[in-house]
Every structure is written in structure tokens, then in C-alpha cells.
Amino acid sequence: MSDSICWMGVRELQGAYDRSDLSPREALAALAGRIEDINPQIGAFTTLTLDRAEADARACTEELARGFRRGPLHGIPIAIKELFDVKDARTTYGSMVFRERMARDDAEAVRRLRQAGAVIVGLTRSHEFGWGITTQHALMGGTRNPWNVGRVPGGSSGGAAAAVAAGMVPAALGSDTGGSIRIPAGYCGVAGLKPTYGRVSTRGAVPLAPSLDHPGPIARSVGDLAIAFSVLAGYDVEDPMTGTAFLPGFDDIDRGLADLRIGVAPSLHLVPLETDHAAVYRSLVDATSRAGGMLREIRIPAASEIRATFASIQMAEAYHTHTRILGTFPAKIDDYGNDVRTRLDAAASVDLPQYLQAWQMAHRIRREFEIAFGEADVILTPITAGGPSTIDQPDVVGHFGSQIAFRDLVMSYTVPQNVTGLPACAVPAGFDKDGIPVGVQVTARSGREDVALRVAQFLQVGFGRLERPPRPPALE
């Protein structure tokens, strides 16, 4: 039974606990065995916290025997992206700059997971400081895509998505500043939610660009995302970016698409989709129409300005983070990976007028999306224009016969939701010609994660089969 345990989702584990078919201790033991078996090939985890996890799982098992549950994640093993502090665990932010760092306390998001009964099994690899989409580091190692270990998993939450996809945990905590939940979720064939900005506290997580950072869950199913999000979301008095707005319920995510207006936005398709990715996307658009969704073509006039706007904001805020908040750049310049060091050097040129001008454009972009949501309930877009890069050449990728930067293949599809702060759910939708998952994303108006998850649920049930990746070969 241990192998089947590794492929259970949050709701399946809950049901098994309720029937006394399985205990949290048994679930953790099965997953710990899976991690020991395949993590060396995948590289999803950087730090394991199995001693505390075993104690927590034992306590959860005893509590269940007494009929007590701490919350909706009682006894559920969860992994944490290494940008979030986990008390008494080595938490390096994916960088040699903090290679010996031990966290003193849990981040607020981690605290909420524990309060709901989650069993924290360890920290998963991030691209250094979350600033990249390959989850590779020349010295600290990288994560491999469970569907093809020669390809990257996406990033920066690549370790979290790979751990879920490979059956090492049913769910994980990630973060998304420019697509860092949605990109690896799409490439690894799992579901991921970037909530509305300010829904989930960032306290206790290292910032990349504070006005763009969005913590959120990754899981094997949309329904499991709803459970995890409900635990994570809410006001944090110590985090002024969080709000007190009403949190939606998720009882209706199985209702289908009847009466929903499904927006498609050709103006956001700034990088042409590879033929196989285009076929997957078109099939989903057609399916939403057949299922009762009302298709609407919407326009975002400033679409071509979004990525440059994002870049100015992200670089200015990241530079401030590393020079003023962390105080590590340029003081520890030699400890940075080459790609992040290069980006910080470039970010030094973004001055205050450029940053303020970018925010002026960001407000215009936000207003254009508000207008668009007067015509549609959700916007259905690709996550990427093609497949992931290779481990050997992670920063470039072939596209219609030419080599382009991997970031250019992806970022124009994922940064709009960070600039606008809108919720977006990534969901598996099929496979490309190489057998690697293809994802799509559902974006909803601010605060309507329930609507995004409702459409994503329909798509996953119809197209995002919960298949298992092949067993990874032993690495030489």
C-alpha cells in the first residue's frame, strides 16, 4: 500500500484517516521512503525535517484516535519552499550567501499550516532568492523535471512543484513574483494558485520584490489547492500588505461553467505558441464553449508594456532588498550565483523616476484588466509558449528554429497577474510532443479565487489527468 499512499492527495488522505484505513504516521513513513528513494535523482528537497515531522505525525495520530482534529490539514505532510523560514531548519534562500543560516522561527504561512495540522517534512529548492525560472544553481545543485530529468522543472518554486509531481508530498507552499508558482506547476503537471495580492502573509519569507510577491499553494488537484489556500489566507496584523477582505468559499467549484463568461485575450499572446502548446490551448478554449461557457474576446491595449513595467518594478525592489534590507550586495557579491549577480548589477541602473513611471503604467494596466472583467468572469491564457529548457543549457531554449532566452518564452504570459495582483490558477491541460506536461492558467478578478478555481476544476477534470511521471533513472 505504501506506493499508493504517495499518490494520494490531501482529500484522499483525509478520507483514509477518517475511515481509519491509514494514520498520519503511516502516511509520513511512506512519503519519507519515497523521498529517500527518488529525491537524489530529482533534487526537490534541500533540507529535511523528518525528526520533528515524525513527532508531529505521532501526535496527530494519537489525536485522531481521541477524535480530535487540529484543522483541515490534520496529519497532512507538506513541503515548504526554502524562501520561507522553518524554525530550527537550515533555510538558505537558495543562496551561498546564507548557506549556514538556521531559521529562528516559522514564517507566518508555515505557522498557519502547522496550526491547521500540517506535518512539515522539509524545505524544497528554489531558484536563488526566487529570482529565476530554472531552479538551477551551479554550486548548490538544481531540481530536475520529474517527467524528464534532462529538463528543468521551471521556477522559482521548482522544488515544490517537482516534489508534488513526483509523489513525495501531496502539497507544498510556494511563492510567485513573476510566475514562480504557475511556471513549475505547468511544467510538472500539477496545480498551483497565485492568490490575490495580500491574501497570504509574506512575513518570515525573504522578499524578492515586495509589491509583486505572492505566497500560494501547489498541489496535485484544484480541490486540494482550495483547502490549502483557505488555511493560508487571511489578515496578519504584523504584515501591512495583507487585507481584511472577505475570503470566498469553495463549495461551488464543481458546478462547471454554466453562465460563466470565459475571456480569451489574443493581445496577451506576445510570444507565439509552439504548435503542440497551441493545440492544447485551443482544445481547452473549445471545450469551455461546448460546456456552456460563453466565450468573450477581450483586449488589453497596454499588453506590450506589461513586461517592461514588471521588470522596472522588480529590479528596483530587488535591488533595494539586497542592498538595504539584507545588506548582502555588494558586500557578499562573490557568494551570489552568476545569473542573480548579473541581474543585481543591471538593477542598479533603475532610478526613482523610472520606478515611479513604471508604477504609473502599472495602474493603467490594472485599470485595463478591471475593464476587461466587465466583459468576462475569467481570462484563460497559456502559461508558457513552449517546453522547458534543458539542464545543460537552462537559460536558452529553441523556439521555431531559433534560440531565445528561456525567460522570453515564458514571462510575457505570467507577469501580468503579478503587476495587477490578480488571482491566477495553473492547471495541467495535456502534454507536449516530448511528453512533458502543458499547463494553462485561469485569471479572475481581484478577490475571486473561487471563480478561478471553479474554471480550473472543470479543466482539470476534463483534461488534467493525475498521471504519474516515470520513475527517474539513476544519475551518474
Image (tube, rainbow, N blue to C red):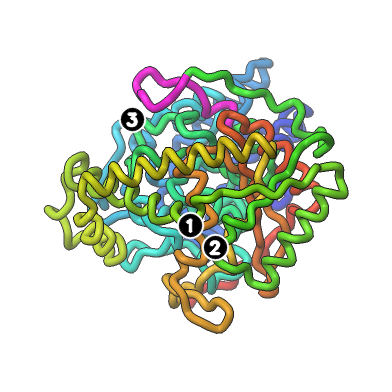
x, y (%) of residue 225?
63, 37
Nearer to us in this view, 125 or 196: 196
Determine if the magenta segment contains residue 145.
Answer: no
Q: Amino acid at mark 2?
A: Leu
User: Which secondary structure lies at badge 1?
Assistant: helix
Query: Who comes first in sequence, dot 2 or dot 3?
Result: 3
x, y (%) of residue 333?
17, 59
Q: Residues within 10 Å of mark 2 (few under 14, many from 20)?
A: some
Left or right: 295, with 403 as reference point: right
Q: Is the residue under label 2 in contact with that under label 1 (CB below 8 Å)?
A: yes
- The residue at 69%/46% (across/down) is 263
Determine if the magenta segment contains residue 235.
Answer: yes
Q: Residues within 10 Å of mark 1 (few under 14, many from 20)?
A: some
In the rendered structure, which segment of residues is drawn in magenta?
A: 229-243
Q: Residues within 10 Å of mark 3 (few under 14, many from 20)?
A: some
Give the residue number, with chain letter if any, for mark 3.
105
Work out whether 226 lies above or below 347: above
Q: Nearer the viewer, mark 2 or mark 3?
A: 2
The picture quadrant where one finds residue 72 is top right
x, y (%) of residue 469?
67, 62
Give the residue number, with chain letter if any, for mark 1.
304
Q: CA distance from mark 1 to mark 2?
A: 7 Å
Query: Who comes first in sequence, dot 3 or dot 1?
Result: 3
Q: CA distance from mark 2 to mark 3?
A: 43 Å
User: Which secondary structure lies at badge 2?
Assistant: loop
Give the residue number, with chain letter if any, for mark 2.
270
